[in-house]
Amino acid sequence: MSSQQEGTFCVHTTGSRPKLVVSADGRGVVSHAGSRLLADLADATGLTGSFANVLGRLRPRGTGHDPGRVAVDLAVMLADGGEAIADLSLLRDQREVFGPVASTPTAWRVLADIDTTALAALRTARAIARESARLQAAETRRGIRVSHAGGRDLPGLVLDLDATLVTCHSEKEQAAATYKHGFGFHPLLCFLDNTGEALAGLLRPGNAGANTASDHITVLDAALAQIPDAHRHGTDILIRTDSAGGTKAFLTHLRNLRQQGIQTRFSVGHPVTEPVRRAIRALPRQVWHPALEQDGSLRGSAEVADLTGYPDGTRITVRRERPHPGAQLSLFDLDEGLRHQVFLTDTPYGEGSVQHLEVSHRAHARVEDRIRCGKTTGSGRFPSRHFHINAAWLELSLTAIDLLAWTRALLLHGELADAEPKKLRYRLLHAAARLTRGGRRLHLRIAVTWPWRHELANAFACLAALPRPAT
């Protein structure tokens, strides 16, 4: 019997990698060193202090870990890509870099103690930190980024609302069957398109209605409360949703906000109903215009047109295009040989061509990318059987998304200023470094061979130069 038949194999290397002797006794080595950037940014924006103030009552007899600091550490862990509360061990086991970090049972207790009152206080604390981040951006001459669509800048702020499904693989409180025959939750979220910040979210059972007006109103009001007064009043705010936001109650609420000095406009999807189909068929050929790509160029395979508006000034706009392979088509689409999509907007005539209004509405699709990235930052997996703990987890997930957005806006340049969380983690947050001491100081030494060492070092330098909020 040959040696291979006896279970002994000869391995022939095909590359030139050096042989290694692996041991588990390294000292002074730090992994995920770039995540310290997130923790320090939470301090610099006042988020850590604000969380400590509002959660102070949860600290038993003033002993043990500060609940606000525990909440920030959880948000940092989620921004770093952690998926479970036990992943706090990555920060806890590197005490020299991250300081004292709570144990897993302590973190569980903090989350369990966040009731409805504490959750509302956390949202207020996030708004305070967001205002500080805005002021820091203004003082560093960065300001709030402009949203783009169709090769043009969109004025003011753009808020995108959308719901998503999160699958649960075990029984959890208020988890339920979803309309896609799954099981889990159906949270409704709102993102600021200008910066990618996660302004608000509402955890809902899996069977919650997609077009529930009261939930849309709750999330929108919570999102507007996150915007500093200087921007909430006197700034154009465009609200975009899919057809789930096209309810009469929600649109009435948006109009009523204008009476409170909030300059809202809406752009919401609308179903292709029978009256809409009749109106589309009656449109003369000359009213159709070529649609635009997101870079402003003409899209030859698609056209847009205005339909007759509602008496209250709402415009109905339709887009038709040749369907791509695999597109889901209605009987009307099959009959016409084109795919049709309709949306409503209250932007007055003369304040934007139908082409630019349509391409601006289509940019609402970016919210799908926000949600996808959010699911890798905590909102794709809920840890507890108890609904109120999962609601607190969602709020910390939104906080983690904000930390990443503020990092891009305040500390990064070039392509990293637009990078998704996956790229930021791979290039910056998960960088390894050595810890050394000298001159009574602790030095974090990024590997000289790390390709993005200069970007990470520059981010720490920008963080050190940020003006701190008054305490």
Image (spheres, rainbow, N blue to C red):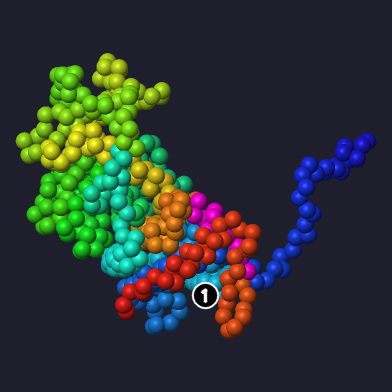
Quadrant occupied by the C terminus: bottom left
Residue 458 point in image, percent of width and height: 49, 64
SS at badge 1:
loop
- The residue pinned by badge 1 equals 99
Is residue 274 among what the camera can see? Answer: no
Q: Report the span colored magenta.
A: 423-434
Q: Residues within 10 Å of mark 1 (few under 14, many from 20)?
A: few
Residue 274 point in image, percent of width and height: 17, 24
Residue 429 located within the stretch drawn in magenta: yes
Instruction: Determine whether 98 is above or below 417 in the image.
Output: below
Is residue 240 among what the camera can see? Answer: yes
Seen in the image, is 404 located left or right of residue 448? Answer: left
State the residue at coordinates (59%, 83%): 439
Q: Nearer the viewer, residue 460 or 261?
A: 460
Residue 234 located within the stretch drawn in magenta: no
Q: Nearer the viewer, residue 370 or 232?
A: 232
Residue 192 point in image, percent of width and height: 30, 52
State the residue at coordinates (39%, 70%): 466
Instruction: Determine whether 195 is above or below 240 in the image.
Output: below
Residue 255 point in image, percent of width and height: 12, 48
Amino acid type of the residue tagged 1 in the rendering = Gly
